[in-house]
Image: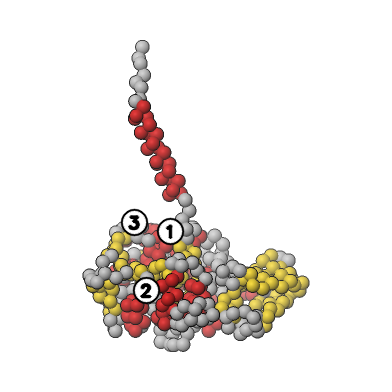
Amino acid sequence: METKRQIPKSIFYYKVMLLFIACLLLMLNARPQTPVNVIVDTDISDDCDDVGALAILHAMMDRGEANILGVVVNSTCVWSAPCVDAINTYYGRPNIPIGTLKGMTGLMDNETTYNQYITQNFPNDLKSGNNAPDATVVYRQILAQQPDKSVTIISIGFMRNLYNLLKSGSDSYSSLNGLALVTKKVKTLSVMGGQYPSGDEFNFDQDPVSSSYVVANWPTFIMFSGFEIGDPIMTGSLLYTKTPTTNPVRKAYELYVGVGNTRSSYDLTSVLYAVRGLSNYWTADTTGYNYVDGAGVNTWYASPDKRHDYLIRKMSNANLAKVIDTLLIKTPLITSTQTISQIETNNLHVFPNPVIGGELNIAGNADITEVSVFNLMGQKIDNILVNNSTAKLNTSTYNKGIYLLKISTKDGVINKRIIVE
């Protein structure tokens, strides 16, 4: 009769302990991560990669990885801000605050390859950049309301908004000046700009005064994603076969590169890093600092060591393209596929918007029962009961800024974003 071999107790307990540790690691990895709070600063006029960058950010927000606090535009084209609004609306987030660069011209004023078409053919509230508030105001309003060291800013374009933010003074949102506010609230600045270890790149050289100043004076950590990182990562080919014609991202790529073609992923790499970090995509040079001269040309110096890093390729370009394309074609959790005419027929009109501290009108075909007003912190600041197809709000006591309207009707709830100036 064969005797079963007994496992020594020490080995048995050792295996049990290994199994316990493995289960614990799985549980830890399965815990939902805290979403990264981001503000995007984009030119969204001269290249479709800005549109792609917003698309993958929305996809990561749908996955619980990111939280888009706001988007500001750093070009001076009037079609850029409403193009952002149209993309946010497609992804079911029409109320994300949007600001735009004010007080200057000359940064892609007439770049309309896709943004004008998107504005005029996809649902959005802004219609024109003239209807968007000043980017500096939006920055300060959002940052003032966030926990300390909790915000990641993604710069995918020119640095004039960041320049203006650093030089801004105290206001009704914060007693801190711009430099102090950034120091207090911002954790990371993720920048698509420059070439590494040195070079002349578009985002830096179009507004070299701003680029040089921001890179030299930014008070928190900066990660640079250079031209050489995104250039060979070709993405977007699946948009034409895997997403509907109602997708403004698909349309932007069609208009910019032509149906079936791909585009380099310059801005998308900065977004991917901002949310997921180095992951297994990149390593980084962590010693030294980046210097941008008066012409916008950058040079990396090995010393002194500042809070500057730049990305170095680790994963193959082909595999990184697969990661990005998977996000690019992700179906939104909530989307708006209606045309502009359908939106205007079915939804309520809110006007004037922006409103200059006076009466705001709400009118449409639906019977309104209640209107609630919330600030960007989600705090209710006003509320009126209604039993009519029209309503009026007195905004004279509101501070300047962006507010969210929750309009309850007998057919459902409609959300709108308003700007008080």
Q: Which of 409 and 38 is in front in this view?
A: 38
Q: Earlier in the sequence, mark 1 or mark 3?
A: 3
Residue mark closest to the camera, 2 vs 1: 2
Please name whichever residue, 189 or 233, is drawn nearer the observer in this view of the structure: 189
| Residue corresponding to mark 1 | 326
Q: Mark 2 points at which residue?
A: 219
* Marks 1,3: beta carbons within 8 A: no
The residue nearer to you, when weighing 74 against 266, is 74
Q: How crowded is mark 1: few (under 14 residues within 10 Å), some or many (20 or more)?
A: some
Residue, disc 3: 280
- Give the farthest residue toward the right: 387
- In this view of the protein, can residue 159 be seen by the observer? yes
Q: In this view, does 246 lie to the left or right of 341?
A: left
- Of tags 2 and 3, the one toward the viewer is 2
Label 1 residue SS: helix
Q: Quadrant of residue 255?
A: bottom left
**Image point 53% across, 77% down: which residue?**
173
Q: How far apart are marks 2 and 3 (CA)?
A: 27 Å
Q: Is mark 3 on a helix, strand or loop?
A: loop
The N terminus is located in which quarter? Answer: top left
Location of residue 236 in the rendering, given as x and y in whole percent from the top left corner: 41, 65
